[in-house]
Amino acid sequence: MTTGFSPQYNPRAMSELTLSPQEYERLKARLEELERARREVAREIAEAAAQKDLSENAAYHAAKEKQAFLEGEIAQILQKIRTAKVVRPEAGKVGVGSRVRLQHVASEQVFHVLIVSDINHSPDADGEMPVSAGSPLGQALLGRAPGERVQAETPQGTQEYVILEVLSR
């Protein structure tokens, strides 16, 4: 029997980026890494440019490509930081950063999920699946408490879940 559980299914993006404090700190740390790399690439460009003939200077062109990639990623992270709303989940209620144990009603299968912003996440060491707060399941869970039933539209149709436990990070 299919559970309809599909954490990557997200047909509509969230209009506002909601982050847990941990996600926000990870973004800031990544920005610092990129800014250090930016300084290093600027040095590489200057060294390569000193070799004069730029038309056939592979080191110069490689460094410029690296610089363009870095600048693009820096711009994306800065935009996320500027528009981010950092929230701490209310105790006992599902929010961004909450670890949730829920049960699919039809199959009785139990899932452990981590509610995340729309920033890319992979399963963590505890085997929890990341569920975007902007996904149908994420939206159905937000603000809910243990014992409540929620319904979410999935590629397999409407699925119903029971929230068994909510833990904040």
Image (cartoon, rainbow, N blue to C red):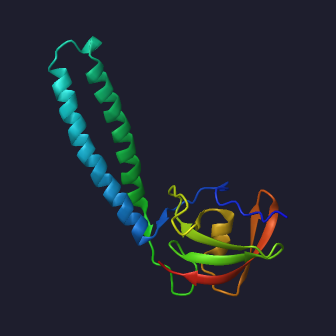
Looking at the image, residue 16 lies above or below residue 165: above
Which residue appears at 24% of the width and 35% of the height?
41
Q: Is residue 121 visible?
A: yes
Indicate left or right for 152 with 67 as reference. Answer: right
Indicate left or right for 21 with 42 as reference. Answer: right
User: Residue 124, percent across and down?
Assistant: 52, 64
Residue 83: image quadrant is: bottom left
Q: Is residue 132 visible?
A: no
Question: Which of these two is toward me, 10 or 66?
Answer: 66
Which residue appears at 68% of the width and 67% of the height?
137
Residue 5: image quadrant is: bottom right
Residue 7: image quadrant is: bottom right
Question: Which of these two is toward me, 67 or 83?
Answer: 67
User: Residue 154, percent across and down?
Assistant: 75, 61
User: Residue 75, percent across and down?
Assistant: 37, 46
Looking at the image, residue 162 lies above or below residue 85: below
Indicate left or right for 27 with 51 as reference. Answer: right
Question: In the rendered picture of this protein, how many numbered marks are placed on residues?
Answer: 0
User: Residue 12, percent across and down?
Assistant: 64, 55
Which residue appears at 45% of the width and 74% of the height?
87
Looking at the image, residue 25 lies above or below residue 93: above
Question: Which of these two is toward me, 92 or 72?
Answer: 92
Which image quadrant: the N terminus? bottom right
State the residue lying farthest toward the left.
Answer: 50
Which residue appears at 39% of the width and 52% of the height?
77
